[in-house]
Amino acid sequence: KKASTYEAPARIINTASINGINPPMLETYAYSSSKAGMIMLTRHLAQRLATDDILVNCIAPGPFQSHMMAATLATLGDEIAGANPRKRIGQPEDIAGVAIFLASRASAYTT
């Protein structure tokens, strides 16, 4: 908060999941609920902190290769990729690009 200014707002970038917006095909109730909670927390903080020149955003990606997803993708990877609008699993560059944008001057009007 001390570092934020009107011209150069501070940033909070949360990470959730598309499963916090749309119910997933898997029965991951706690996961989906926690991601939905993160999205709502982001919305609350975005509204509250905007007047303090702090931008709050949340990235809600689709499936990515990870330790948590390894077994799922090994058995259902083609089906999961096929259900994605891009017909693929996310790559590290996909999420990095969004985070870099949200942390940059280019997103100074995005909250």
Image: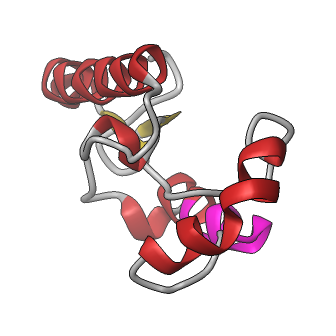
Magenta span of residues: 90-98
Most foreground residue, 100 or 109 = 100
Q: Residue at x 34, y 18 (%)?
A: 33
**Residue located 13% across and 27% down the image:** 47
Q: Is residue 108 above or below residue 10?
A: below
Q: Nearer the viewer, residue 11 or 41?
A: 41
- Asked if residue 59 shows in the view, the reply is no
Check the picture and name the quadrant holding the N terminus. top left
Residue at image position (82%, 57%) is: 74
* Picture coordinates of residue 70, whole percent (x, y): 83, 46
Seen from this angle, which residue lies furthest bottom?
86
How far across and down, in percent of the image, does residue 36 sit? Answer: 30, 26
Q: How many marks?
A: 0
Tell me how the rendering is colored.
secondary structure
Decide whether residue 55 is among the magenta residues.
no
At which x and y percent is residue 107? 39, 62
In the image, residue 79 above or below residue 99:
below
Dividing the picture into quadrants, the one containing residue 93 is bottom right
Residue 44 is situated, as x and y percent measured from the top left of the image, at 17, 19
Using residue 102 as the reference point, say whether residue 7 is left or right of it. Answer: left
At x 39% / y 19%, what residue is drawn? 29
**What kind of secondary structure does the magenta stretch mostly adopt?**
helix
Q: From the viewer's perspective, tell me whether residue 71 is left or right of residue 95.
A: right
* Residue lying farthest to the front in this orientation: 75
- 94 is within the stretch colored magenta: yes
Please, is residue 29 above or below residue 50 in the view? above
Of 59 and 36, nearer the camera is: 36
- Is 76 located above or below residue 4 in the figure? below
Query: Horizontally, is 40 left or right of 30 in the view?
Result: left
Residue 72 at least partly seen: yes
